[in-house]
Image (cartoon, rainbow, N blue to C red):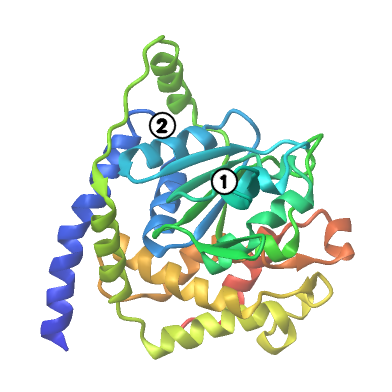
């Protein structure tokens, strides 16, 4: 066991150089936002979709486009608008009169990295067009089902739902995102650098520095990270505490949570914790990995009650209380 762990540690150290190449390339264009970039990389390695929320102008789209440009893979961007149709995403059938047959015209969803920009600017019918693609990695057009390329990753941005002209995402779709990351304003020193770098007409060019084969290798190494049964139990306790707070001495949350996290949250939390440990250079998961990545996995899966909204609480407030109370192994 010790030999295997040491071999894995060496492999993790070697593969971390691949991630650092991507970080350095993205940093040419994106100032600061280290947490956002790390979560983008985590989603890429964990093969999970990512939702980024923040007001306009915080480099959400720029960061995702920079990541996509640093990967030698297919990339497509869809600008979500109120008049967008589901066929604009997944494709449609076109009739060829001369040949008397229908032909499928594939939509932009048939790519490796899909940027769904301002996803909550479109109504629920359009947002839901991505459900099958995100979960099953396939698309059904008419009576034909076609697989999507491997890997396939949806990187979506959204404005806060309080913004004018936005629509809340359906719960079923939100649950398909492995992570939801909130982006805040940059620090003063970072904004000075943004001003100096972005006021020039010529922007740095991002070039591909990692291949799809290297990404697949990163995923294989991350999958091999050891998850101790005690940490597995801790992950289960965290998720179950969102459903039955009283059993975990969290009676105060009982009236504040309408619905807790689903079993998909348990799976994603374990996967994300393993990749986080891998990105930290470790061959094993610690409870701190779960605590660090937990809010990003759970914040969009815990539905608040009217009482919580009346108290002006959000899911981050409740999750902070939860992680401070649930026993750590």
For the point 40% across and 90% down, the residue is 229
State if disc 2 and disc 1 touch (CB < 8 Å).
Answer: no
The image position of residue 200, as x and y in percent, is: 40, 10
For the point 52% across and 58% down, the residue is 49
The image position of residue 212, as x and y in percent, is: 29, 54
> Which of the 4 quarters of the picture holds residue 207?
top left
In this rendering, would 92 be left or right of 31?
right
Frontmost of labels 1 and 2 is: 1
In the picture, the disc for residue 1 is none
Sort mark 2 into few (<14), some (14-19) or many (20+) by Cα contacts within 10 Å: many
For the point 39% across and 41% down, the residue is 67
Residue 280 seen in render: no
Q: Is mark 1 on a helix, strand or loop?
A: loop
Q: What element carries label 2?
A: loop
Q: Nearer the viewer, residue 195 or 130?
A: 130
* Residue 230 to residue 70: above or below: below
> Which of the 4 quarters of the picture holds residue 30?
top left
Sort mark 1 into few (<14), some (14-19) or many (20+) by Cα contacts within 10 Å: some
Location of the C terminus by quadrant is bottom left
For the point 20% across and 59% down, the residue is 15
* Residue 113 to residue 229: above or below: above
Distance from Cα at disc 1 to Cα at disc 2 = 29 Å
The image position of residue 209, as x and y in percent, is: 24, 41
Residue 317 seen in render: yes
Q: Nearer the viewer, residue 134 or 26?
A: 134
Disc 1 target residue: 107
Q: Which of 249 and 197 is in front in this view?
A: 197
Location of the N terminus by quadrant is bottom left
Disc 2 target residue: 30
The numbered mark, 1 or 2, whose residue comes first in the sequence reads 2
The image position of residue 325, as x and y in percent, is: 61, 77
Count of all numbered marks drawn on residues in the image: 2
């Amino acid at each position: 066991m010790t030999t295997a762990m040491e071999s894995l540690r060496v492999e993790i150290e070697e593969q971390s150089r691949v991630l650092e190449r991507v970080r350095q390339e993205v940093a040419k264009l994106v100032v600061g936002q280290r947490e956002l970039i790390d979560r983008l990389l985590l989603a890429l390695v964990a093969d999970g979709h990512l939702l980024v929320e923040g007001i306009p102008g915080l480099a959400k789209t720029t960061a995702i486009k920079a990541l996509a440009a640093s990967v030698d893979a297919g990339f497509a961007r869809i600008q979500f608008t109120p008049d967008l149709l589901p066929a604009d995403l997944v494709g449609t059938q076109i009739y060829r009169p001369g040949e008397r047959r229908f032909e499928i015209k594939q939509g932009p969803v048939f790519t490796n990295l899909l940027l769904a920009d301002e996803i909550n600017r479109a109504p629920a019918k359009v947002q839901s067009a991505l459900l099958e693609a995100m979960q099953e990695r396939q698309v059904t057009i008419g009576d034909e089902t076609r697989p999507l390329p491997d890997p396939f990753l949806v990187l979506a941005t959204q404005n806060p739902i309080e913004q004018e002209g936005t629509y809340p995402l359906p719960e079923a779709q939100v649950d398909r995102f492995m992570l939801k990351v909130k982006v805040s304003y940059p620090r003063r020193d970072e904004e000075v650098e943004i001003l100096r770098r972005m006021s020039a007409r010529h922007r740095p060019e991002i070039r591909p520095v990692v291949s799809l084969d290297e990404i697949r290798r990163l995923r294989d190494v991350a999958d091999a990270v050891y998850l101790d049964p005690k940490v597995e139990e801790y992950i289960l306790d965290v998720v179950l505490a969102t459903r039955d707070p009283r059993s975990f001495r969290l009676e105060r949350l009982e009236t504040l949570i309408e619905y807790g996290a689903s079993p998909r949250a348990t799976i994603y939390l374990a996967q994300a914790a393993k990749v986080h440990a891998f990105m930290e250079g470790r061959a094993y998961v610690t409870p701190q990995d779960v605590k660090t990545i937990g809010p990003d996995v759970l914040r969009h899966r815990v539905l608040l009650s009217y009482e919580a909204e009346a108290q002006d609480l959000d899911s981050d407030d409740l999750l902070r209380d939860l992680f401070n109370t649930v026993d750590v192994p």
